[in-house]
Amino acid sequence: MSSNEPMCTATEEMLFDSKARFDDERILKEAIQYAERFFYSKPFTKHQIGNHVVDIIPGIHKLSRPIHVVETESFRTRQRLSHGILHVIAAADLIGKIHEQYKQARKYSPAEQDLQDLAAHFNLSSETLLTLVKVAAIFHDSGRKGDGIDRWDEESADNLESYLSEKSGIHGLNKNLIKLLGNTIRYKDDTAGFYKACLELGLAEIKSLQADYLRQLLNNADTLEVLRCRDSFDPHD
């Protein structure tokens, strides 16, 4: 290829690779690159004071929690100090580790069978479905406009659904699966709401119960990662 020829982006390459949707490592890498570029490299615009959300006044350093600039000879990016790309990558990494713990406790937990059954329902391997839960973890704070209580789960879920539907190179994902993955963010702290949303998607009761395992994975990973995101941690909060 000559230096004058345009180079395909990684996402564009995926569009021409019929096996790309099964390349779990690549799926996750592309999601991280996209989310970092369009969401997590942007500073927060809101600050929460009690139950109130106010605009951040430019120049007030303490409230704005300014993003950290990371720069090398060939690479430059900006990172939020909390609830940014490092947080969501760590949460995504925890997804697999938590699942392994559930697998080891298979005598007490049907987690692996639930994952396999649900993956088969959507014509995927269990490995790819688990990767897609990791992608959900990557997007779970993408809609955040400020630290503190997460009031933007709906926006984050919409970002994930938009990415999987229109902007990723992953072909052929079931629309109900995309909505289900969005709902793991939208209802990540709401078991009853998630179950009801599953039924509204037409999933049978048993499939809805199995699908809740995906929500639990995301919720647990986010909860474990909160220790790094907060300046202080009180388990009683």
Image: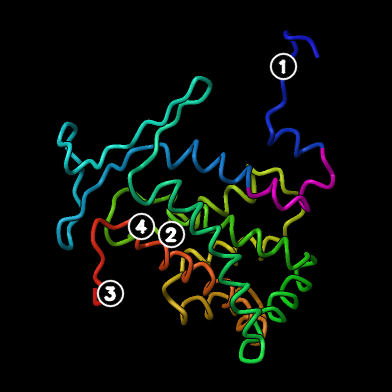
- Which of the two discs, 4 and 1, labels the residue nearer the N terminus? 1
Q: Residue at x 53, y 80 (%)?
A: 195
Question: Mark 3: which amino acid?
Answer: Pro
Query: Which residue has dot 1 on it?
Result: 6
- Distance between mark 3 and mark 2 Cα atoms: 26 Å
Query: Which residue has dot 3 on it?
Result: 235
Question: Of circles 3 and 2, which is in front?
Answer: 3
Range of magenta residues? 17-28
Question: Mark 1: which amino acid?
Answer: Pro
Query: Which residue has dot 2 on it?
Result: 154
Q: Residue at x 66, y 86 (%)?
A: 106
- Residue 228: assigned label: 4
- Which of the two discs, 3 and 4, labels the residue nearer the N terminus? 4
- Distance between mark 3 and mark 4 Cα atoms: 13 Å
Question: Of circles 1 and 2, which is in front?
Answer: 1
Q: Is residue 188 magenta?
A: no
The local secondary structure at tag 4 comes to helix
- Which of the two discs, 1 and 2, labels the residue nearer the N terminus? 1
